[in-house]
Amino acid sequence: MKALRNYLDSVKPNFEKGGKYEKLHSTFEAFESFLFAPATTNTGGVHVRDGVDLKRVISMVILALIPATIFGIWNAGFQYYNVIGQADSATVVDCFLHGLYIFLPMVVVSYVVGLGIEFATAQIRNEQVNEGFLATGLLIPLVLPAGVPLWMVGVATAFSVIFAKEVFGGTGMNIWNPALIARAVLFFAYPSKMSGEAVWYYGDAVDGHTGATALAQAVEKVEPVSFIDAFIGIMPGSIGETSALCILIGGLFLLLTGVASWKVMLSVFVGGAVTALCFNQFGPDTPIAQLPWYDHLVYGGFAFGAVFMATDPVTSSRTECGKYIYGLLIGFVAIVVRVLNPGYPEGMMLAILFMNTMAPLIDYIIVESNVSRRKKRAIAK
Amino acid sequence: MSDVIKLRKGLDIRLKGRAETVYGQAAEPELYAIKPTDFWGLKPKMAVKEGDNVQAGDVLFFDKQRPEIKFVSPVAGQVSAIVRGERRAILAVVVKASAAPAPVEVGKLDVASASRKQIIEKLLATGAWTYFRQRPYNVIADPDVKAKAIFISTFDTAPLAPDYDHIIRGNEQAFQAGVSALARIAPVFIGARSTGASKAFTEAKDAKVTLFAGKHPAGCVGVQINNVSPINAGEKVLTIQPQEVVAIGKIFADGKLDFSRVIVLDGSQVAKPAYYRTTLGAQLTTILANANLQGSRVISGNVLTGTKVQADGFLGYYDSQVTVIPEGDKPEFFGWITPGLNKFSASRTFFSWLTPSKEYDLDTNTHGEPRAIVVSGEMENVFPMDIYPEHLIKAILAKDIDKMIDLGILEVVEEDMALCEFVSTSKVPVQRILRNGLNLMIQEVG
């Protein structure tokens, strides 16, 4: 450890202004602060500071994603063996290894493309590399179907990092969740490749086995997958989104560490449940409108969106009161899109992106009400 | 019975090195300094030259814009140095004492029969007017302005802060005399701790007492103002600390100008944290003999709002506390992923939240690098005022003056928002941003 520190100190001058590798300054700095928390001390203002920093927060998000990721890898492999008709003979290890074979290249592409752009922009702007993408880079493959070609992963990542994040000023300045933008780009730019059943699995299906997601099936028949199966998550879908159980474990960890807002998480589920219940009671007599409310919460990307996407603090409402409104409306919009637009059953992504857009408006209204209350205070006297 | 206001938001930073209520011994130092830098926006004009002999209470310098506001020497002696910084700005006026500090006779004044004008003039003449700070902006008070109220917070909730109940002991009558004098200038509001506060505070006459329960910053006078009688546009409020009230009480009741102050020396680098009797502007060398200064930072004030001083530095004008903590200038291997049982954090990302009463030996490391604001709600959690701190900070960064006023900049000063800076995951320099905003306000609005 000491040797490593000495080595870093010895090569550091090469990366500073005028050094040989001056153009890699941000890159060096990122790796150095990854290995060693910097020795900077407080000047002016407070003399002591809280132990937490952005690296710590992002690390917690990545830790929280681990259960869903591991399950997702296994499930991707299992779905592969399922559609080729060998589900019975494939062992857990087989499924996991094949899942890795599908998932690992997606992760590598996402991180290489995304971090490459991040490092380059940090260098151009002469800023430090921001940690935000370390979570986004894992989230992108998790919200994509297993059958997506790798070049599409790369295109989507590049588009979202550049146009959803860096043009706004980088992590903390973006309006929309970058991982969801990556998915949205693929859905709208390559509809032929991203719709239908084939995209949900990897490989060629044999007759009689379908890769259709639970939500796609729910358009035609009531409760195609039982609640408990959907909760555990052995079904086709985006890699990380199928297991509500694993997502909830991650969600509990996020709540325990206080990284995600319980207000947002809870209100998304409440908003979704209440809206689905209303459709059950008063909605049209279509299978999807009659899908029980609890199934809505475990089908498709609802749970994943509620736990990992809606709670992104940058793109969510920033006032405490606004978080309830923001969350409730995400749940509401997601179910409305699912039920009333059978051509596009997955409403969660659109709901979150739509509410990302609306979040500043919610905050504006809440802050303005505070301002006018404070002004009235002066007049009332 | 007084009202009790319970504040739910806030954070107590549990530092090692809290002082017992005992007095330590330290020799009187030789040097004393009054530092114009302790007063925001002050443009000092010197009344003495280097080498001049002064008596205690003699004017050292005054406010260039309002010459009636005087800053006086706390001891008799010789002006040994006028320390200047960039562009010849005066940083400190140092007096070398020729005799031990002692109260100066200034003549009694009966508060009950004196007019408001006479009281203010007495305070101006003795230099005691400078004990007030005026909100908005936390600047030296303007004697011509009719203040809406005078607020006194009688307890300090900052980390390792001094206990005013202890400091005030023996001076209860002088405190009451001070309050009665202040009450002639403007209505006096006292904020006291809800449990166990000295009767000198909770049963003070000529003042409205409000009790506060809660974590830091419940003891910050700005928070108390916001909860009792918030500052609206155009209003001015004066604030003053208990020891200064005692000094004012002694002027009117005893006719004595007394510069003695009690301070607490604490922090993890102090073997026996204790209280010390000293004098306004005293050099800290003799008191700091009781601290380990190797690899340490000496702070005049508390760890959130205090000023870094050298080991031969001077006590800040408004400070009743000197804290010594270790410097944190060492890199930490994989600092961001350790379980962090030894790290204090308001967030629960370190598992130290499982040990809620543990005390911590915090150093001055930043624990991370500055980033754009990402985490939401953390500042709100430690800011018990009817103001949105993050939106205010952003309005200041955007230099949008109308928005700053709307969002409450007139009600806050640095100490009220210091915890917002402490908890910031993105290491936002909240106090510096706020001071820039306040300076911009003074410049553009006045």
Image (cartoon, grey):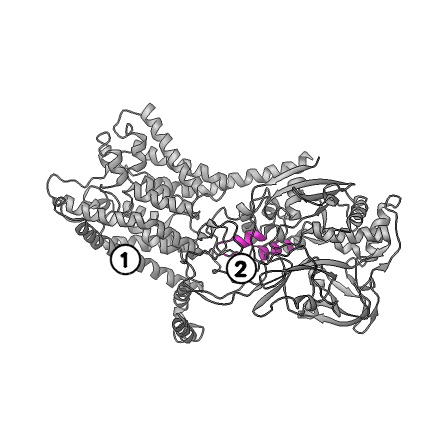
On the image, the x and y values in percent for residue B169 come to: 74, 51
The quarter in which the N terminus of chain A is drawn is bottom left
Task: Provide the major secondary structure of the magenta segment.
Answer: helix
From this viewpoint, is residue A184 visible?
A: yes
- Give residue B114's mark: none
Whole-percent x and y of residue A199?
Answer: 21, 46
Name the subunit of mark 1: A
Q: Position of residue A335 (x, y in %)?
A: 33, 34
Q: Does residue B440 appear left or right of residue B64 in this picture? A: left
Extreme-left residue of the structure: A207
Point out which mark residue B362 bears. 2
Residue tagged 1: A109
Between residues A13 and B113, which one lies in front from this camera angle?
B113
Q: Amino acid at mark 1?
A: Val
Q: Nearer the viewer, mark 2 or mark 1?
A: 2
Magenta-colored span = B418-438
Answer few, some or many: residues within 10 Å of disc 1's Cα (few below 14, many 20 plus, some between 14 and 19): many
